[in-house]
Image (cartoon, helix red, strand yellow):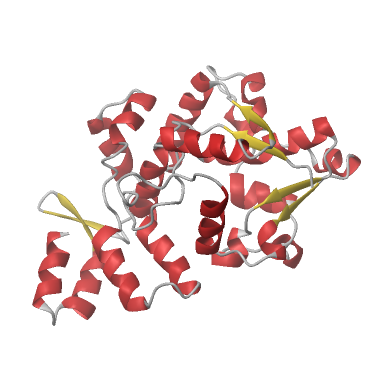
Amino acid sequence: LNPLLVTFNPLIPTPIGIENREALLEKGFDSIYLNSNKLISKKLSLRFLIERGNPKLHWNAGITSFLYRTAINFKIPFIFYAEHGETNYGGKVLSKESEKKRDYEEVIENVIGDDPHNWESSDIKLREISPYLMPSQEELDEFNIEGHYFGYYFPWDIKDNLNYILKKIDFKLHPKGRTVGTFTDFDSLDDYIDDVYYYLQYIKYGFGRAIRDASRHIQLGYLSKKEALEKIVKYDGEYPRDSIEKSLRYWDINLEKFNEIIDNHRSSLIWEKNNNSWVHKYLNDLLQKIWINDNTKKNNFEKY
């Protein structure tokens, strides 16, 4: 193969992400890096933070549409993605074929969840959101371009992937030994805003990054359920202290405004107010059912 590596810029790039990308390119690859309009990206990120509790929704569109646009421009017939999330981790699988090939309808429904043409507004022109606009299915058919999932052809194992890349390049792990909100030190290191993104997942759905990572480790046989539970209790829902200030500067809002926004995304099915503090209903259930007979663990849980 003679691959072209294509990168859609992170919202707030991290030094370690830049280093790791450069280490990969030093192995001898052609690459294209799109630095999309930062002013427009900030506006969209704040808008989707407020509206949907997802400051990366437009980025999800960009990493898909820009790859297809690049493939059309250079007449490259195949695009390779990592794993098919819905098949590997659970979700809405629209067709059996989508486990192997990127399904156009699934991209719009699951990845973007919207038509970026809707993002045009009084201060954002249609031409300014062009990096996020998907080519039509007719265009893709005309150029015979297909998106495939690497995970269909080879087992997708996050630890095997890590061990492989550590042997090939000088890949930097998280300098603090783990990423805030979880116990892993190698995943999603290239964007400061990712810490806030996963914290918002915890706010909206009641589970955070540690549960996501622990579930994958259980699935692959790297953690027992007992070990996973201990890590979840210790780290899940951890406040994004390492990147919150950078994110607030990026959006040009203060902490009070941010807290107001995230509180608007709390579901009454998950959260309740107690003495002016938010309490996670299901974590209380977990404490009662699992930890109540172990005073040491109970105290650690309450401290958390």
**Residue at the limit of the structure toward the right, as seen here:** 142
Residue closest to the far bottom: 293
Identified at 39% across, 52% down, the residue is: 185
Residue 12 point in image, percent of width and height: 44, 31
Above or below, comparing residue 18 to residue 161 in the picture: above
Give me the residue at 22% from left, 79% from top: 290
Task: Tell me the quadrant of the picture where the C terminus can be found.
Answer: bottom left
- Give the answer, above or below, for where 167 lies relative to 249: below
Residue 214 lies in quadrant: bottom left
Tell me where residue 104 appears, x and y as whole percent.
74, 49
Is residue 69 found left or right of 294 in the rendered image?
A: right
Taking depth in this image into account, of 200 and 230 the one nearest to the observer is 230
> What count of labels does the image hold?
0
Would you place residue 261 above or below residue 124 in this image? Answer: below
Q: Is residue 179 left or right of residue 151?
A: left
In the rendered image, residue 142, in percent from the top left (x then y), is placed at: 90, 40
Q: Quadrant of residue 46?
A: top left
Position above or below: 154 against 200: below
Choose between 24 and 191: the one closer to the eye.
Answer: 24
Query: Viewer-proximal residue, 222 or 260?
Result: 222
Q: Is residue 256 visible?
A: yes
Viewer-nearest residue: 67 or 56: 67
Which residue is found at the position 31% from the left and 25% from the top?
253
Left or right: residue 93 compared with residue 239: right
